[in-house]
Amino acid sequence: MTNATHKPDFSERVDQLREYIFSQPSSTFENNPLAVANAVESFANTKGQMMIFRDAKLQVARTQLEAQTPAPRTILEFGTFVGKSALAWGAILREIHGEKISGGINMYTFELDPQMVALFRDLIKLAGLENVVHVLEGPGSESLKKLHAEGKVTSVDMTFFDHWEEFYLPDLQLIEDLGLFQVGSLAIADNTDFPGAPQYLKYVKDGGRGTTGSVKYESTSFETASRPGRPSIFEISKVVAVK
């Protein structure tokens, strides 16, 4: 029996988010990924108490992506969660290249939880991003290896880390080892203040693996306004050399 002190588990919150989105007129969201992303953030702020990549951080990242030359074509995301950031990355790619994308513009996001994958696939369809955004179920490292082996990902313009923080560094190094980074590529890591990713931060701020490494970074921490107790710092690292 539900009482006043009952707190829904995360599965319930995902179901509530689905209801929140799909109970509204579909015309509100059709072919409008930023509207869907904003609705997810609104739910997270007012109802779901979810840790997502909020708009203040997104605007900083957007500026970095829009400044890339040549324009970004491939984005990876480790940790789809409820899909807010993935929707935004897809929308940004479409805005940069125009709505009539001829091909070769892809955003791949990796997620372990099948409930999240199912929700996000429905959100992708609602937002009209089926040709740009692709969610793969399973460990991100294995999904990326498969994409690379199939020739679907041969270079990466931006990678976003927002999964388990202890995997930030191994997954970054996997991208290096596969030879996917190029000069100008970006690695963006969320929640570097809390829960924190000290090994990852030390690595990118030190420039990478050093003399034995093939990729060198310049890295900057960004802090945005946040409610008390919520993570507010994220890291943007730019590839400045590839041997």
Image (cartoon, rainbow, N blue to C red):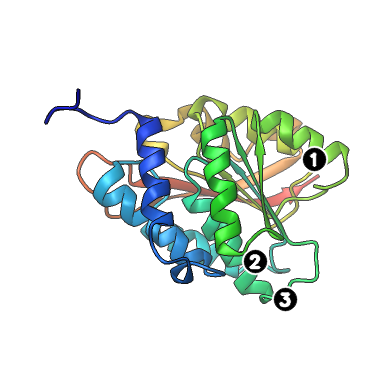
What residue sits right under mark 2 in the picture? 68
What residue sits right under mark 1 in the picture? 147
Q: Secondary structure at mark 3?
A: loop
Q: Is residue 243 left or right of residue 170?
A: right
The answer for how far apart the CA atoms under marks 2 and 3 are is: 20 Å
Query: What's the residue at 56%, 51% (across, down)?
Result: 122
Q: Is residue 56 left or right of residue 140?
A: left
From this view, report whether residue 14 is shown above or below residue 139.
Answer: below
Residues packed near mark 1 inside 10 Å, few (<14), some (14 to 19) or many (20 plus) = some
Residue 204 at least partly seen: yes
From this view, report whether residue 158 is shown above or below residue 72.
Answer: above
Which image quadrant is residue 169 in? top right
Residue 141 pos. (x, y %):
69, 30
Q: Nearer the viewer, residue 231 or 237?
A: 231
Q: Residue furthest left?
A: 4
Query: What's the residue at 74%, 37% (across, down)?
Result: 144
Q: Nearer the viewer, residue 226 or 241?
A: 226
Q: Earlier in the sequence, mark 2 or mark 3?
A: 2
Query: What's the residue at 40%, 40% (across, down)?
Result: 15
Which image quadrant is residue 193 in? top left
Which image quadrant is residue 168 in? top right
Q: Amino acid at mark 2?
A: Gln
The residue mark sitting in front, 2 or 1, is 1
The answer for how far apart the CA atoms under marks 1 and 3 are is: 24 Å
Q: Amino acid at mark 1?
A: Leu
The residue mark sitting in front, 1 or 3, is 3
Residues packed near mark 2 inside 10 Å, few (<14), some (14 to 19) or many (20 plus) = some
**Which quarter of the figure is the N terminus placed in?**
top left
Which mark, by number, is residue 100?
Answer: 3
